[in-house]
Amino acid sequence: PAPVVAIVGATGAVGVELLACLAARGFPLGGLRLLASARSAGRTLDFAGRAVAVDELTEESFRGVDIALFSAGSDISRRYAAAAVKAGAIVIDNSSAFRVDPDVPLVVPEVNAAALAGHRGIVANPNCVAAIATVALAPLHRARPIRRLAAATYQAASGAGTAAMEELRASTAAWLHGEPFEPTVLPHPYAFNLFSHNAAVDPETGYNGEELKVIAETRRLLDAADLPVGITCVRVPVLRAHAMALTMTFDEPLSPDEARRLLTAAPGLRVVDDRAANHFPMPSEASGRDEVLVGRIRTDLGDPSGRSLCLFVAGDQLLKGAALNAVQIAELLLRR
Ligand code: A2P
């Protein structure tokens, strides 16, 4: 029989995309339960053209549920995931609550599908940057082990939720009308500006929480526990697609042509690398697309050894960075 699926955080930025992904991919559903806070109880959400009621999340919400997609923040995941597992559901968790738990596989199907086999009721869906970056890194890493990675990100508002997307719209409108605007969701003015990622900064290392997540999760996903990773994460005034510059050093030289061949053949990627037209991955073209866009494939002139390559990548934060990856994990579970 088709599985009963619950979505925790159904009214959020990712929740709404989870619904859209399930519908678009024709995911077999034996039932659909939409859960959110008490504030949303009684609302309805559209699923494939019909209105489905939203219920308040409680410990009893998981009776009869086979797959529970969690996307309501790590506090909610820590509080309710155990109840879902106890009720017999497999949890696919989009929060950071379990991503570095050795008992919980962290999975990007194109990168490490085999890791799913070890799950004990909870599967973690990675941080959006780690998911998007590793789709591009994994095919190269399989051909030549990556020994060092440097990254700079250009991250969209959606990673901070629907309220942050609304703040980007409202602050941009205010700016254009010459009106004052006080940010309440993000810590700095967002319109016509960019700022270091809003996650708290570790006073010891100077790295923020987002950067530390990407480092730990990229290592797990690539099965490269000691991979040295340097990264700077920045929020840019884009609604829903992240971009990133990646520079990697390999064991042995890898030519840009060979890298282009590997990336062209890899699942989940689309090469956008037109030097003549100066057309490379952009958030505007990554938004609403399942594939991660990759381009600017070139030798890193900053490494005279010739063993380093640069890439520029863009991927939809709400799709491959969150909802799509979670639904792909659910599809893998069904196939087992
Ligand atoms: P609600 O809309 O009822 O607040 P986003 O990341 O876009 O901000 O969305 C967060 C999601 O998490 C929303 O669906 C939100 O529901 C849900 N959520 C937040 N707090 C709770 C809670 N205490 N119990 C259940 N769901 C919650």
Image (spheres, rainbow, N blue to C red):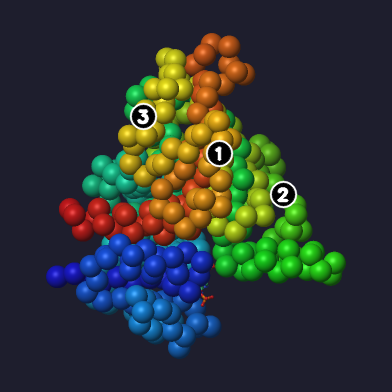
> What is the residue that sits farthest to the front in this orientation?
276
Q: Position of residue 268 (x, y in %)?
A: 36, 44
- Mark 1, ligand 1, within 8 Å: the answer is no
Question: Upstream in the sequence, badge 2 or badge 3?
Answer: 2
Q: Report how far apart the C-alphas of labels 2 and 3 lie in the structure.
A: 34 Å
User: What's the residue type where badge 3 is placed?
Assistant: Leu
- The residue singled out by tag 2 in the image is 195
In the rendered structure, which amino acid carries the disc numbered 2?
Answer: Phe
Q: Which residue is mark 3?
A: 262
Q: Position of residue 287 (x, y in %)?
A: 51, 55
The circle drawn on residue 279 is 1
Query: Can residue 86 be seen by looking at this rendering?
Result: no
Asked whether the residues under the numbered discs 2 and 3 touch, taking CB atoms below 8 Å apart as contact, a structural biologist would say no
Task: Using the rendered view, name the quadrant where residue 134 is placed.
Answer: top left
Among numbered discs 2 and 1, the one appearing first in the sequence: 2
SS under mark 1: loop
